[in-house]
Amino acid sequence: MTEYILRRLLLGVLTAFLVSILVFTLLRIAPGDVVDAILGGEGEVYSDEVREALREQLGLNRPLPVQYVTFMRDFVTLQWGESLRNNTEIWPQIQKKLPITLELSIMTLLISVVMGIPIGTLMALYRDSWIDYLLRVFSLAGLSIPNFWTATMIILGGAFFLNWSPRLEYVSPFEDPRANFVMFFWPALAAGWVGQATQARMMRSTMLEVLRQDYIRTAHAKGLQYYVVVYRHALKNALLPVITIIGITVALILGGTVIIETIFQLPGLSRYLVQSLQNWDYTVVQTVVLFLSIWIVLSNLVVDLAYGWLDPRIRYD
Amino acid sequence: MATQQERVDPFSGRARPSAQARVWKGTMNFLVRKPLGAFGALIILLMVFMALAAPWISGDPNKWHITDAMYGPSLKYWLGTNDLGQDMWAMIVRGARVSLYVGFLAVALGSCSGGVIGLVSAYYGGKVDMTIQRIMDALMSIPTLILALAIMAALGQSLNNVVLAIGIVQIPRANRIVRSQALSVKESEFALAARSIGAGDMRIMLYHILPQCMAPWLIIASAALGTAIISEASLSFLGMGVPPTVPTWGGMLSTRGREFFIDNPWMAIWPGVAISLAVYGFNLFGDALRDVLDPRLRGL
């Protein structure tokens, strides 16, 4: 077990290393750089000398391997440096923005699980009936309707019918829990509807498979009530593969927060990332992407461990 | 050429139906057994028609009818006009072209190369597999939209770069599904038999393993179509996709759509309806396809 965790962590380090190279390279082959973003594009008022001086000041004229090694050294020693664009320290920014993205992700995950699992179960129990079709139409709609449109429609509906619009400034849950909840509920609903679809689909097929098993027939045969068979015997076993899907959903949800945070103007990590990307703010982008990918690697590990804990048949070796 | 006599079924002795008849029968069977899937296929066909016939069924999307700006749906402008007086029906129809182009090409690129990578990785195993799969792990540990955004930032905004960005993002999934299938097929007796009669690596991979991986690959690819269309719209929505001069559904919902949608909700409604219907069609079809192709679920 310990060996398994250690091996997975080592592989995770390798993955993070590859991600760092990938992101570093992608940003360096991009046309234009942060100097253009600060001083304006080619042919603007600033002379080439000024541009060069700024590049030197920001350390952009050093050889690429040197830049990469510096970035990795700073990342590993947690000296995450500052933004190239406006000289703000990156780490305090992440500390401030991470809870927002985290809260949004957790609420999204909760909503998608609370919707997806009952929907999938019902679809399997009433297979090929109108309930199955109706739920499938609803569930697949979540996967088909882009989250930015759902979000836009929520804002539009709120403005038209309820005279409501999303708050523009962030409220901490410790200051005003209710306002904070409302602030995160709608964005999480727009994003959770997407995540729900994969879980419902998986739930339906695993549930169908479990319902065909002999022990379910036995449970029925010994006269157990229908819901006891479903809840006690079928649901528990059908849930297992769905848990792996929840692990995949973490990456999906983090990707979704990019758009949701932009629309609802939540000052989270993803929005920070997109803004930095648009400004060619190398240091911020590579640090945040690496941070996010470590987050995903770790949450996948946690899910795999949880899987083994829930299903004793699984052995790590 | 096959003669009529060769088409006799060796077991029953009855004549086998022609290929055409079998396809026809299969299609009819699909229509009856999977009405939702057939509905999805209908939506896809309509969209393809819209994209192909764009110049004949709509006007010029880039013409500004300034005096007619911000109209709701009417006989003259079926879906209304935006703040610049551009005909939204024309923009939606042109948007279908971009969505389909990006969707099909990105999936062809991403799923095919992902599939080939998965096949090679599983077949050779060992160090090759280890190296390839670590790279795939790295790609998968970056949220797809963020990876696509980074690729777009690196390549610059253009239609074909969007195809490339979305295609690359889809590689790991196709790789994973084909690899796991190929790993088990590789050990099967017929693959072993092929090897024992001296078949080369390429022959075993292409003729013996690949056909067995087609069903899960098709399922992943059909699901990827919808995702690709949403990704394209998301990139355009964030202003990092196709250049803003090209009418796209995501772009219509972006800056302008969001600035004026309180005054003219149609500007935000139509592009969203278009994206949702298109992706819905692909998802319904893909779902039905999976039910038909996935042997584990067959007959459920």
Image (spheres, rainbow, N blue to C red):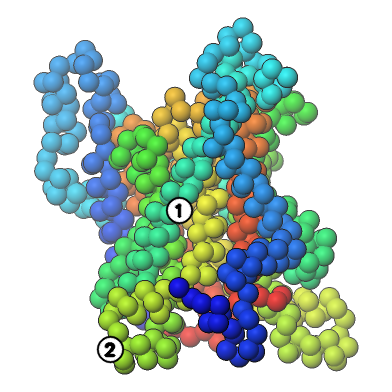
User: Residue B139's x, y, as percent?
Assistant: 37, 57
In the image, residue A230 lies at what x, y percent?
Answer: 78, 76
Q: Does residue A260 show up?
A: yes
Do the dots labelled 2 and 1 sit on one chain? Answer: yes
Image disc number at residue A60: none
Quarter of the N terminus of chain B within the rendering: bottom left
Is B64 located above or below residue A128 in the figure? above
Relative to the observer, which residue lies in front, B263 or A230? Answer: B263
Label 2 or label 1, whichever comes before in sequence order: 1
Q: Nearer the viewer, mark 2 or mark 1?
A: 2
Q: Residue at x 87, y 81 (%)?
A: A225
Q: Residue at x 65, y 55 (%)?
A: B284
Q: Which of the labelled discs sits on residue B107, or is there none? A: 1
| Subunit under mark 2 | B
Residue B130 sits in quarter: bottom left
Which residue is under mark 2? B198
Q: Residue at x 30, y 40 (%)?
A: B154
Identified by mark 2, the residue type is Gly
Q: How many numbered marks does the figure carry?
A: 2
Q: Circle 1: is it few (<14), some (14-19), or many (20+) Cα within 10 Å?
A: many
Question: The C terminus of chain B lies in which quarter of the figure?
Answer: bottom right
Distance between the Cα atoms at labels 2 and 1?
Answer: 35 Å
The amino acid type found where label 1 is placed reads Val
